[in-house]
Image (cartoon, grey):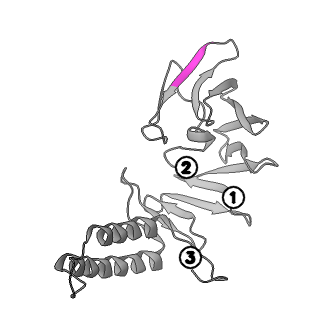
Amino acid sequence: MPEGVPFPQLSPGDVLIYGAVMAQMASATSPAGDSGEGAGCAEARAQGRTAATRMGKARAGRGLLADAAGHTYTYNAQHRIATADNNNIQYVYNAFGQRVEKSVGGVAWYYLYGPAGRVVVELSSNGGGYRSEIFADGRHIATYVNNATYFDYSDWLGTERLTATLSGYEQDACTSLPYGDDFACSGPGGDPTPLHFRGISAGNSA
C-alpha cells in the first residue's frame, strides 16, 4: 500500500466477506500455457465480484447479519457495535471509544473505567445489579458481586481458570480451547465475572 495511505478499517462483517473472497481466489489455479487464465480462475473471479458487491452492501449498512449463535448486529461509523438482536440491546460509547452504557430490556447498565482503561465498576439503572472488578499490576485478581468477593486464578495468558471465595472454597472452574472457544465454567456458585479469555469480557450480550 502506498506510503501515507491509511489502511482501511473493516467491520467484522467486512472481514467475514473479505475472507470468503480471498478463499475463493486462493482456491483457483491457472494452468500453465499462454492463455494465463483457466476456467477455475475465471469462475473464482466472478464469485469474487459477487462477494465484493455483498461486501459493499454490508459496509454501507454497517451490519453483520448474524454470528454463529444467531445474534444480529449493527455497527456505527467507528465500526463498533451499536445494536444487537434487532435493537433489543443498544450500546453507547464515550469520546475515547469506550463502551459506557448498555441497554437491555429497558434497563441500562453503566460502565466506569479505571486509569488503565479497564472496566472497574458495572451498575444498573434500576439498582438491581452491581459488580466491581479488582486489578493489581495489570492483572485481574478479584470480583466483588452480590455482596461477596471472589478471587480469580488465571493461567499465563490471563484467562480465568478458577475462582474461590474469601474462605478459600472453589466457586467455579473454567475450561476452554486454546483461543478461548467453547469457554465454560462449572461449580457450586456459578460464574461471578464475565472476564474470561485473557481477562476480556465475554458475556452473551457484552
Q: Observer-nearest residue: 34 or 21?
A: 34
Residue at which label 2 appears: 206
Please give the name of the residue rendered at 56% of the width and 68% of the height, measured from the top-left corner: 79
Identify the mark at residue 17; answer none if there is no mark: none
Name the residue furthest front.
Answer: 33
Quarter of image, res 131: top right
Amino acid at dot 1? Gln
Question: Vertical placement of 140 versus 48: above or below?
Answer: above
User: Badge 1: how crowded within 10 Å, few (<14), some, or many (20+)?
Assistant: some
Separation of marks 1 and 2 at Cα, in angstroms: 13 Å
Residue at which label 3 appears: 8
User: Badge 2: how crowded within 10 Å, few (<14), some, or many (20+)?
Assistant: few
Q: In this view, does 5 lie to the left or right of 15?
A: right
* Pointers 1 and 2 in contact (C-beta within 8 Å): no
Question: Vertical placement of 66 versus 36: above or below?
Answer: above
Name the residue furthest left.
Answer: 39
